[in-house]
Amino acid sequence: MKKTLILTLFAISVVLLFGFLTGLLADDDKIESLKKEVEKLRGLKFKKDVPVKNMKKKEFREFLIKLMHEDGITKEKARDIARIGVKFGFYPESFDLYNATLNLISGAVQGFYDFKSKQIFMISDAELPANLPKAMAQVEIDSTILHELNHALDDQLFNIADYLRKDPDDRKADRAMAVMAILEGSALDAQLTWVLGQPSHLIPGLGKMICDGQKKRPAISAVPEAMQIELLWRYEGGIDFVHRLLKKGGQKELEKALKDPPVSTEQVLHIDEKYYKEDEPIEIKIDEKKLGELLPEWEFVQKDNLGELFTDFFLKQYVDEKKATEASEGWDGDLYAAFKEKGEKKKGMILIWLTVWDSEKDRNEFFNAYKQAVMQKCEIKSEAEGDSVTLKNDKGIFHVERKGHYVLCIDGFPDKLLDTIKKQVWSNVKEKSEDKGEKESDKKEENEKKDEGEKEDEGGEDEK
């Protein structure tokens, strides 16, 4: 399950404060001093040293290509992912996602913590704007290192990045976004608190103010809005989430959340109603192997999810903003699967998107908003009503239907395959009460295992 949204590969620091790096020297004394600052800010201690190394822009681009390929993101895969993004309206037709990703990250990043090697790398040869005072540039460099050290601390003490280290087939984009949000929120709060000399959570709207400014930077403004959100929401949404934690219970509350991080962007967006009430999304299943057997002329591309964050963004492109928000807020889980037509000159793609909602009211709001979005996107005029609606014109064919708490959306299929696809997808759908029951049982088992592990850790420390 390679990513439609592919910037969740490592924890990156964009140039959030002043300018660009120049000539960084990873001085050991400076690193030690900043480690102590992080420990003082967090009230925690590092378990071990964190290597901090320099990397030139050219090396960084090569490293990024290697990292993407390890995650299955080749040029061909990126083309397929971009075509899925076109279906959702995230990218324009024939969008070069591969190079756009490289250019975005290369142009925005000044440092990063690599989850796999557990090292910090700083990009050392970017040019410094002529009018940026040297002292201010040094603050930018130091605060960036402090930001990345905070990532390392959270990783050492809470294993917070374990989900991001999973095999790509075991990860989903929405949960990765949620994990990145608390990671970046924690690091950005520490960074800004250190720079400002006062707790950053006392300054309302700080995350939005910083990220709004970032959107004007050439490397970020050059890419579609979906990619901007993917990069910047982890900071804005993340620091808002962390600030809510800190206001509730200080650093101890943040530590509790790092041990039990949010599992969806929905939980980040709605901390009281979803995170604290442990309202986790339904796990949806789509059997791509059985679908592949039924679609011999089509090749499976990938399956993943959007989550509330990108479901909302999808709808907002085509329907009224208030209606889009109302339609996405009842999200309780989603999964899409994409198949491309076999053959070099074939350009067809089938997108199967199954969503589940908190209530029938929420389901109906999304059902109606999706129909309106399709009609707006493809200039289809239709008065079709009922629980199962097919919309088509020379730009495409779409089907949407509701059943129980679920809505099934199919985009780009040949007429003769509709019943076949529907039957197979619905055969994997359980009643929502069954899903919830299994989820609660799994959660209980997971917590029991976690408690046992903590007891073992405590025993090991006592023996030492």
Image (cartoon, rainbow, N blue to C red):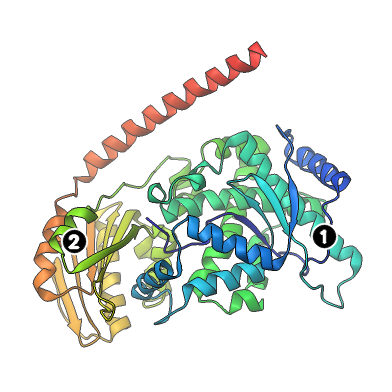
Q: Residue at x 14, y 65 (%)?
A: 387
Between 144 and 71, the one lying in front of the other is: 71
Question: In the rendered view, would you say 131 is above or below 327?
Answer: below
Callout 1 crowding tier (Cα within 10 Å): few <14, some 14–19, many ≥20:
some
Q: Residue at x 38, y 33 (%)?
A: 443
Q: Secondary structure at mark 1?
A: loop
Residue flagged by tag 2: what amino acid is it? Answer: Arg
Question: In the rendered view, would you say 321 is above or below 251?
Answer: below
Q: Do the residues under discs 2 and 1 have CB atoms within 8 angstroms?
A: no
- Disc 2 marks which residue? 402
The answer to whether 188 appears left or right of 373 in the picture is right
Q: Earlier in the sequence, mark 2 or mark 1?
A: 1
Q: CA distance from mark 2 to mark 1?
A: 56 Å
Is residue 209 at least partly visible in the picture? no
**Residue 370, quarter of picture:** bottom left
Residue 450 point in image, percent of width and height: 47, 27
- Disc 1 marks which residue? 24
Between 447 and 130, the one lying in front of the other is: 130
Residue 429 point in image, percent of width and height: 19, 49
Question: In the rendered view, would you say 361 is above or below 313?
Answer: above
